[in-house]
Image: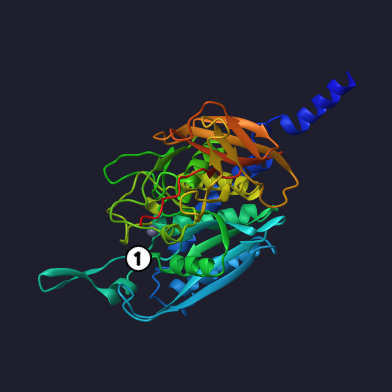
């Protein structure tokens, strides 16, 4: 009897899956997002006249300088724990950058506790663009100086992403997270993803660990120019291939986002971005960081990059709902354990070369799926691990098997060649890491 009881105790401590119920702290953060504050931020951003990167850095009320100073000062006021800096870069004339220019990202860091080396980035771009055209012979060209001088309200593109970043900095800085969260208002998106590119390059050079880039660009309107409205869904773009870090993050965003914001459908689009368009998630994705883009399904093309991308044509309530999805995902991820380490090195029998790949085999029988993994970091509130699987052609994870505390799992008589397998770590509050996917590493061809 005593043995039975102690077994039961061991089972309940280590064997039982953490509840799939909602983490009340994440729920609280989601419900703290304020439509009124987002509306006020959109109006304030419009009031700078233009936030074009070539506009004035010195003018007290108009232009890019007044805008980035206001964004930084606002975020400083949210919490003394937010470390706010102006991240400046001097860029030389090149391509779309028609003269030398200084660009300034506004960066607010909320330092983590037990996993402070891991970063969750929430971003939008605060620069704006109103393209003024001129005739050059037969051709229409952008009139650079007239473009810089014009009013460029940029409320949906991308005052809305900036408002999301600022609102999340305000709400989330009232909490402590295990991972470090970075709230970034990027500059120079409209002239070629300039600020994000500089940031991503530096992150790579400094070997910064980034668990997610949640980029928000054009989340401020819910009515398309043809009258189509889709205000209970948001598009989430992620670059190929099918199990890339960005795609894996997209699956996480959909699952966690819809769990906490059931009114929103996260419509995962398995593409880097829209046709002929780009965003600040892309420089991160190219380097290998997991990075996705939120954007409205109801773009109003006639307002974009014009003087009519105004507050009057925006929907703060829609922007707030997308901000809530971000809040859920960022909070759950910043409290979650790191994803398990599934890499291993084996020596090729034929070539004697050492090859790195996933720790997945057919086991002793030759016909099982045998998964191994290692816990990453020293996670005190770890509940255990869950193995997930799906058909190789299925978009999202289909089955989940709770393992508990362990380092391996066997699926008897299951072919590793026909399905995709992954494993994730879960803590006692139910916060889940992203999935580590057992991917085939392409072989080098002779
Ligand atoms: Zn944009």
Q: Position of residue 88 (x, y in %)?
A: 50, 76
Q: Is mark 1 within 8 Å of ligand 1?
A: no
- Residue lying at the far right in this picture: please name it: 2
Instruction: Read off the residue under disc 1.
Output: 129
Q: Nearer the viewer, residue 413 or 228?
A: 413
Q: Residue at x 46, y 70 (%)?
A: 198
Quick check: 28 above or below 292?
Answer: above
Across and down, in percent, residue 190 comes to 36, 65
Res 22 → quadrant = top right
- What residue do we see at 53% from left, 35% from top? 362
One can see residue 128 in this view: no
- How many badges with numbers are in the image? 1
Q: Is residue 410 among the parts visible in the rendering?
A: yes
In terms of depth relative to the viewer, which is nearer, 229 or 235? 235
Q: Quadrant of the C terminus?
A: bottom left
Q: Position of residue 97 (x, y in %)?
A: 34, 75
């Amino acid at each position: 009897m005593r043995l039975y009881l102690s077994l039961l105790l061991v089972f309940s401590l280590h064997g039982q899956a953490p509840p799939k119920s909602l983490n009340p702290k994440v729920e609280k953060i989601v419900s703290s997002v304020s439509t009124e504050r987002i509306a006020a931020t959109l109006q304030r951003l419009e009031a700078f006249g233009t936030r074009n990167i070539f506009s004035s850095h010195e003018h007290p009320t108009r232009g890019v300088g007044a805008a980035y100073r206001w964004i930084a000062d606002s975020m400083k006021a949210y919490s003394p724990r937010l470390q706010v800096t102006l991240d400046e870069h001097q860029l030389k004339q090149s391509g779309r950058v028609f003269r030398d220019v200084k660009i300034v990202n506004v960066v607010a860091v909320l330092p983590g506790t037990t996993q402070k080396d891991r970063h969750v980035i929430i971003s939008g771009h605060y620069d704006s663009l109103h393209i003024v055209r001129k005739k050059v012979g037969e051709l229409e060209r952008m009139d650079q100086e007239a473009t810089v001088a014009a009013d460029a309200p940029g409320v949906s593109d991308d005052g809305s992403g900036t408002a999301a970043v600022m609102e999340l900095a305000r709400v989330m800085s009232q909490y402590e997270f295990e991972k470090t969260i970075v709230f970034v208002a990027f500059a120079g998106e409209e002239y070629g993803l300039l600020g994000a590119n500089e940031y991503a390059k530096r992150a790579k050079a400094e070997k910064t660990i980034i668990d997610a880039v949640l980029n928000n660009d054009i989340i401020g309107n819910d009515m398309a120019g043809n009258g189509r409205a889709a205000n209970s869904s948001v598009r989430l773009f992620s670059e190929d291939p099918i199990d890339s870090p960005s795609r894996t993050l997209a699956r996480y965003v959909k699952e966690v986002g819809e769990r906490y914001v059931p009114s929103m459908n996260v419509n995962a689009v398995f593409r880097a971005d829209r046709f002929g368009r780009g965003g600040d998630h892309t420089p991160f994705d190219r380097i290998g960081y997991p990075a996705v883009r939120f954007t409205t399904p109801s773009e109003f093309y006639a307002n974009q990059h014009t003087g009519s991308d105004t507050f009057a044509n925006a929907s703060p309530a829609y922007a707030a709902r997308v901000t809530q999805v971000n809040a859920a995902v960022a909070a759950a991820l910043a409290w979650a354990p790191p994803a398990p380490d599934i890499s291993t090195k084996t020596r090729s029998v034929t070539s004697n070369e050492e090859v790195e790949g996933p720790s997945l085999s057919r086991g002793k029988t030759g016909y099982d799926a045998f998964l191994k993994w290692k816990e990453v970091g020293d996670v005190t509130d770890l509940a255990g691990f869950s193995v997930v699987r799906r058909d190789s052609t299925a978009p999202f994870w289909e089955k989940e098997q709770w393992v508990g505390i362990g380092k391996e799992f066997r699926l008897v008589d299951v072919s590793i060649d026909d399905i995709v397998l992954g494993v994730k770590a879960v803590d006692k509050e139910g916060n889940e890491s992203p999935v580590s996917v057992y991917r085939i590493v392409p072989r080098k061809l002779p």
